[in-house]
Each structure stands twice: as structure tokens, then as C-alpha cells.
Image (cartoon, helix red, strand yellow):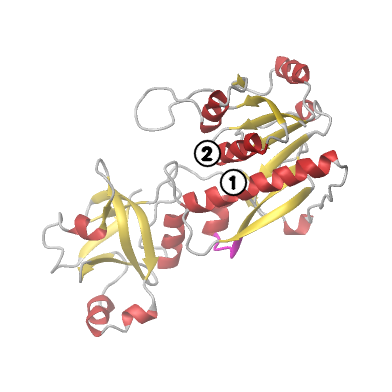
């Protein structure tokens, strides 16, 4: 099939890599967001998808908006059989969806109809879902409301956002390739979404994954696992701003240690202590153990290295609080 691919971040880049590697389809053009400041510094960077397209010598387009009527003409001139979309970051007008013979297929990172919208992976993690997933969805004018096919799922377990996103992207590529083959054979089994089961994955706000002593240890742990460079899980430890990279909820087995139980039993929400080279935060309910973090302006380190720079932490109970 002759394909126009639209996508922007690393998730979409993985899908595009698989599509190019399949050799079964002709990716005649790639559309991605314009170059932007995407990391520390002030220089403009090409998106992950744009880099893959340039390396593969595929024609690259970077429109600032999809509302320009000329874009429809550009797409029509490419004569695609299908438009494949993955985390493009722009709403596509209905006229654009109808340019290709088979319409537009979106690789959506959820088990539809659960988690329609911009942040399905993070919302699944924050809600404590047992499974996350991905499917190929026929795009319509309504947000993520189209029929879907070839769903794939992954047990969340203790996966981080980056780990889960990579797994879902690989499965999403598999789903898309199966969908394209079925489209060519006119054998796709489309599944309509049950409206009663719809939930929405609203875009994360800038500091939504910051956590505080007012939350349970489980809620804080979910925020940490769902965090990324774009949405870090930040907190103040003894007045120092840090991004927490890895943490776990202290279980009953660990609390069977008499010395540890004695040290932690007197803690109140907002207390922080360092015991036996381990760093603990008391929450509204439960204890959170911090394993690794990144202090502002420094490199990643384990909790023991961080604690070594805080005077008196071995013998005193210090304070932790929200970074907001």
C-alpha cells in the first residue's frame, strides 16, 4: 500500500520504524510537527519521527497547522491508499481524513473505548489499571470515536512510563501492520466502541505528577511510574527540589523487621527518614521508599548518595513536601 505517515514523538517513531522495516508498504511521505525546543537548551530540534524520516530519505513535511486548505491538495497529490497516524499532536479535519482510499488509521495507545484522548498511557497508569493496550482505529471527525481492530494489551505491573510506552509502540506497529494487510484483503473485522464504557484521557497539566504528603503512598508511586521528561514527578526533600525516578510502596514483609518498624511507626505524613541506607517518606497512608532521583541541576543518583549530602539525616526526622 502507498502510505502517508503522520506522527511526532518517540512512540510514533517506533511505529514508523516497524512500518519502514516491513518492506510490504511504500511510505511515500511523513508528516510531523515543526522543529521546536524539545529538551534542555534553546536550539530547535527535529521530532523523533522527523529524524527517522530523514535517515530513511522519505519526503518530510512539517506544517504548523492542519487547517490550511493547501494541505489537502498536498496530500491528494501524494495519492496515498491510507493515512497512518500515531501521536501526531494535531487534530485532523474531516476533509483530510477522506483524502486516502482507505481513509485514516490511528494507532491509539489504549484499549478503546477506555481512555480516548491525549494521554491514554499516563491515565491508565494513574488509575491503577491492570492492563494498558493499543489498537488500530478508523479515524472519524469525533475524538477517538471510530471503530477499532487488532487490539493488543500489556500488564502494567511495575513498568515505568518509558518502558510501557516502548512496549505499546511495538505492539501498535504490529496492530497497524495486521490492519493494513487486512485492509488490502478487504477482511478487517472492525469493532464499534460501546458508548457506556467510554472514558477520557485528558492531557496532563504541567505539574500534575508532582506529589505530596496528602496523598497515599500508592498514589505517589503511580505518579512516579507515570512520569517522564515532559511530566516529571517532583517533590521537595528537606527543602531540596528533586525528580523522583524510582520508588515503591513499603510492604508488610519489610515492616516485619523490628528495627525498621520501630523507626517508621512514629512517622507522620510529611516526615522523611533515612534508615539502614534507605530513604523513606511517610504519606497520608503508607510509606514510600525512594530508590533513585535527580536533584535539580545534578545527575541521577540513588537515595543513599542523595542522603549523604544532607546533614543530620541519619539521626533526625526531616520534612518532605510538595514541589508546587
The answer to whether residue 112 is seen in the rendering is: no
The question of residue 130 being in magenta is answered with yes
* Magenta segment boundaries in residue numbering: 127-131
Q: Quadrant of residue 19?
A: top right
Q: Which residue is mark 2?
A: 10
In the drawing, what numbered circle is on residue 303?
none
The question of residue 27 being in magenta is answered with no
Q: Residues within 10 Å of mark 2 (few under 14, many from 20)?
A: some
In the rendered structure, the answer to whether residue 211 lies left or right of residue 82 reads left
User: Where is 281 relative to 179, above or below?
Assistant: below
Which residue occupies the extreme right position in the image? 186
Q: Residues within 10 Å of mark 1 (few under 14, many from 20)?
A: many
Marks 2 and 1: in contact by CB < 8 Å? Answer: yes
Taking depth in this image into account, of 97 and 209 the one nearest to the observer is 97
Sequence order check, earlier mark of 1 and 2: 2
Q: Residue at x 56, y 53 (%)?
A: 123
Q: Residue at x 33, y 78 (%)?
A: 254
Place of residue 130 in the rendered image (x, y in percent of width and height, measured from the top left): 59, 65
Q: Which residue is mark 1?
A: 169
User: Where is 80 relative to 23, above or below?
Assistant: above
Looking at the rendered structure, the secondary structure element under dot 1 is helix
Q: Residue at x 27, y 73 (%)?
A: 267
Magenta span: chief secondary structure: loop
Whole-angstrom CA distance, mark 1 to mark 2, is: 9 Å
Place of residue 225 in the rendered image (x, y in percent of width and height, measured from the top left): 45, 56
Place of residue 206 in the rendered image (x, y in percent of width and height, measured from the top left): 45, 42
Amino acid at each position: 500500500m502507498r502510505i502517508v505517515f503522520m506522527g511526532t514523538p518517540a512512540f510514533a517513531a517506533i511505529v514508523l520504524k516497524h512500518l519502514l522495516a516491513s518492506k510490504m508498504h511504500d511510505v511515500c511521505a511523513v508528516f510531523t510537527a515543526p522543529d521546536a525546543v524539545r529538551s534542555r537548551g534553546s536550539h530547535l530540534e527535529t521530532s523523533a519521527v522527523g529524524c527517522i524520516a530523514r535517515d530513511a530519505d522519505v519526503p518530510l513535511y512539517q506544517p504548523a497547522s492542519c487547517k490550511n486548505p493547501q494541505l489537502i491538495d498536498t496530500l491528494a497529490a501524494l495519492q496515498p491508499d491510507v493515512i497512518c497516524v500515531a501521536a501526531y499532536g494535531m487534530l485532523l479535519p474531516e476533509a483530510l481524513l477522506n483524502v486516502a482510499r482507505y481513509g485514516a488509521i490511528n494507532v491509539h495507545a489504549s484499549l478503546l473505548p477506555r481512555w480516548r484522548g491525549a494521554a491514554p498511557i499516563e491515565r491508565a497508569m494513574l488509575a491503577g489499571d491492570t492492563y494498558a493496550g493499543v489498537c488500530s482505529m478508523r479515524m472519524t471527525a469525533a475524538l477517538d470515536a471510530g471503530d477499532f481492530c487488532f487490539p493488543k494489551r500489556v500488564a502494567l505491573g511495575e513498568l515505568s512510563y518509558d518502558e510501557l510506552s516502548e512496549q505499546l509502540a511495538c505492539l501498535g506497529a504490529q496492530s497497524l501492520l495486521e490492519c493494513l494487510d487486512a485492509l488490502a484483503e478487504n477482511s478487517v473485522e472492525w469493532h464499534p466502541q460501546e458508548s457506556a464504557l467510554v472514558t477520557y484521557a485528558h492531557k496532563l497539566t504541567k505539574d500534575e505528577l508532582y506529589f505530596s504528603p496528602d496523598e497515599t503512598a500508592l498514589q505517589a508511586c503511580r505518579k512516579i511510574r507515570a512520569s517522564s521528561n515532559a511530566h516529571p514527578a517532583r517533590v521537595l526533600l528537606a527543602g531540596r527540589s528533586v525528580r523522583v525516578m524510582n520508588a515503591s510502596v513499603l510492604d508488610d514483609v519489610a515492616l516485619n523487621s523490628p528495627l525498621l518498624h520501630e523507626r517508621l511507626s512514629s512517622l507522620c505524613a510529611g516526615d522523611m527518614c533515612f534508615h539502614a541506607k534507605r530513604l523513606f517518606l511517610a504519606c497520608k497512608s503508607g510509606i514510600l521508599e525512594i530508590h533513585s532521583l535527580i536533584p535539580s541541576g545534578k545527575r541521577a543518583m540513588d537515595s543513599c548518595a542523595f542522603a549523604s549530602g544532607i546533614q543530620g539525616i541519619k539521626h533526625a526526622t526531616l520534612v518532605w513536601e510538595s514541589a508546587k
